[in-house]
Amino acid sequence: METRNKILIAGVLALIVGIGIGYCAGTSRKAPIIISGSHMMPNGQMMGNGSGMNSDTSMEDMMTSMNAGLAGKTGDDFDKAFLSEMIIHHEGAVGMAQAALQSAKHQEIKDLASAIISAQNKEIAEMQAWQKSWYNQ
């Protein structure tokens, strides 16, 4: 049961991160800036508890914008966009996990956050290496 809870928590965190990063990616190509556990978007909006999001922004809209940068692309164009979007997405996950390390009550959340930070940082480094190797970025 403990493993099932960890998987559920990881899934919920991934969904929240994906939504937040998708929204951010739809408005800018820059990663969010983490400020005291909240996400300051490049356009000045705050995220974290949802208080800075427009009330008319739906979850569906955010998920749509998350994939908008990939739409209609193939080959190298797709790969470049995918790497860029995923790096931003993973950076958001690391930021949320860092906030969890500081603020979570349950050790299980802190353990999960540590694992997320480790895994996501490894994947960010790998994707950045591919960008440099394949596209000199």
Image (cartoon, rainbow, N blue to C red):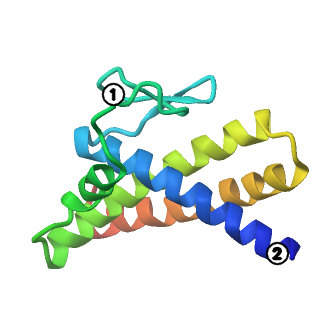
Type of amino acid under label 2: Thr
Residue 90 lies left or right of residue 111; in this view the side is left
The residue located at (56%, 50%) in the rendering is: 93
- Quadrant assignment, res 35: top right
The residue located at (31%, 55%) in the rendering is: 60
Residue 115 lies left or right of residue 34; in this view the side is right
Q: Nearer the viewer, residue 76 or 46?
A: 46
Q: Secondary structure at mark 1?
A: loop
Residue 114: assigned label? none
In the image, residue 109 above or below residue 100: below
Q: CA distance from mark 2 to mark 1?
A: 36 Å
Residue hosting label 1: 42
Q: Position of residue 86 (x, y in %)?
A: 40, 60
Q: Position of residue 72 (x, y in %)?
A: 10, 71
- Quadrant assignment, res 49: top right
Residue hosting label 2: 3
Q: Nearer the viewer, residue 75 or 93?
A: 93
Residue 120 lies left or right of residue 45; in this view the side is right
Type of amino acid under label 1: Pro
